[in-house]
Amino acid sequence: MAPYVAAGLAAILFAQGFVRLRHRGRADLAGWDRAALFALGLAITLVALSPVIPDETLLSAHMAQHVLIGDLAPALMLFALRGPLLAFFFPSAVARPIVRIMNSLTARRVFALWAANLAVWHVPYLYDLALRHESLHYTEHACFVVLGLFAWTLLLDRRLTVGTRLALATAMFAAGQVLTDVLVFSFHSFYPAYNDVRDQQWAGLVMTGEQLLTLGTLAIVLLRPRLRGVRLAHA
Amino acid sequence: MSPTDFSFEPAYLVLAALAAFAYAWQRPRGGRIALFAAGIFLIAAPLNSPLETIAAHRLLLIHLLQNALIADIAPLLILLGLTPAMVAALNRHGGARIRARYALPLWLVAWYGTHLANFYDWALRTNWALNIEHALLIAGGLLFWWPIVSRRLSTPAALAYLGAGFVTSSFLGLALIFSSRPFYSFYEHAPRLWGLSPTRDQNLGGILMNAEQTIVFLAAIGYFVWRLLEEEHISGADGSPAAHRSPYNGRP
């Protein structure tokens, strides 16, 4: 139930920020494309957490769930909120502490937290424990969502240099590769709840594929103007 | 033939010796000599040792190890071992015409083409054709790394090139890892070693290939990301006041 409440709250916050900004005559900063992107992010989160995903029987499905709620959905939602719309998203009462937290984010800190979170939750003992205890499972998902939001806040922050954002993206991909390689390259199952090696290998591939999609797209978007600049210089 | 027996591809001993002689003739200095020597060694040794015996008669895993060494690591080391004068000379004699947009697809054609089942089996059965397979892999590797090492690519372009190479080349290793039947009939009927079934041998070969490429490409990408950060530092882009401002300060 908690994820649906959180998703509903996020939708309400977006709607009020969206309407407020448009009422101020800045529809250019709160276009319908952004509303669609945010809705897509929310929809991905809800689908990932719905019974459609057989996360209790397949590790690959559980991995898909994690990367969707912890990576793709935060990326889409934060991309929709970029710029002034983000400021309108938060009610005044909670804005100050959130701004303080956001101000304290640095690429190194966020990467360290993100990688540690990824590593800790994939320790077989903890992973299995989370499967058996619903509250711990919610905590696990909340950690993925929050750290995903932190990471994408920086990755999409245009005030950071391209190099810093690419460095963070590369570090995240490399850390993800460590986990996926362990899953893909092994010939025995790590998690007692999922006793299928081939499924475990697919889980690794799911994570690599999703990271390539999100971080790869970001890298292309960041590098493209520079490549064009180089071509123009050559011309 | 015992797996510990030596097998030889003499052409690569001769070529390695010629390359070493030509390199020494230019009187290079410093750490570049070690890089070049390591590159030459990683071509000559795997093709003229028990590794060749096992690769050509027993295990795909070892053959793929050979291919990874001669196609990915050795060419990079050889090119890194070249002095700036050598790179400039090579650029004057045609190297400058090797564009990244041609080098990448040609490297991929060599990479995937030499691992096609028909070609691979033919090379292993005729034996002399193994020389052709290895020549194609070495040439492909040199071609791929040349735009990077010759420094004709900007840092963002090098990152894009390496990223594209990493992604597009990884499918072969993944196919080998996820396969449930052997691709190469030669190894299906070859005498086994270390109790590896043909399928497990192939799966392990894919793992080795994928792991090697991940390490090499992420190291190279990491280097160029670091270089991009350096360039931004020098240009002052990272020190501008805007770089330290939070996007959340502009609250209405």
Image (cartoon, coloured by chain):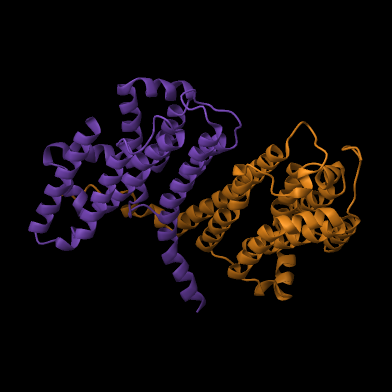
Which residue is at a point 18% across and 48% down the rendered structure image? A87
**Side (left or right) of A24 relative to B131:** left
The foreground one among A190 and B47 is A190
User: Which chain comes out purple in the rendered image?
Assistant: A
- Asked if residue B93 is positioned above or below residue A192 in the image, the reply reads below
Dividing the picture into quarters, in which one does residue B166 lie? bottom right
**Side (left or right) of B220 relative to A156:** right
Q: Please identify the residue farthest to the left as the structure is shown.
A: A23
User: Which chain comes out orange in the rendered image?
Assistant: B
Which residue is at a point 22% across and 30% down the rendered structure image? A1
x%, y% of residue B212?
A: 65, 45
Quadrant holding the N terminus of chain B: top right
The foreground one among A222 and A127 is A127
x%, y% of residue A199?
A: 51, 36
x%, y% of residue B145?
A: 66, 60
Q: Is residue B82 something that shows in the picture?
A: no
x%, y% of residue A209?
A: 47, 47
Q: Is residue A104 something that shows in the picture?
A: yes
The foreground one among B197 and A42 is B197
Dividing the picture into quarters, in which one does residue A201 lie? top right
Which residue is at a point 53% across and 58% down the rendered structure image? B159
Q: Please identify the residue farthest to the bottom as the structure is shown.
A: A235
**Side (left or right) of A163 relative to A182:** left
User: Looking at the image, how many numbered discs can be counted on the residues?
Assistant: 0
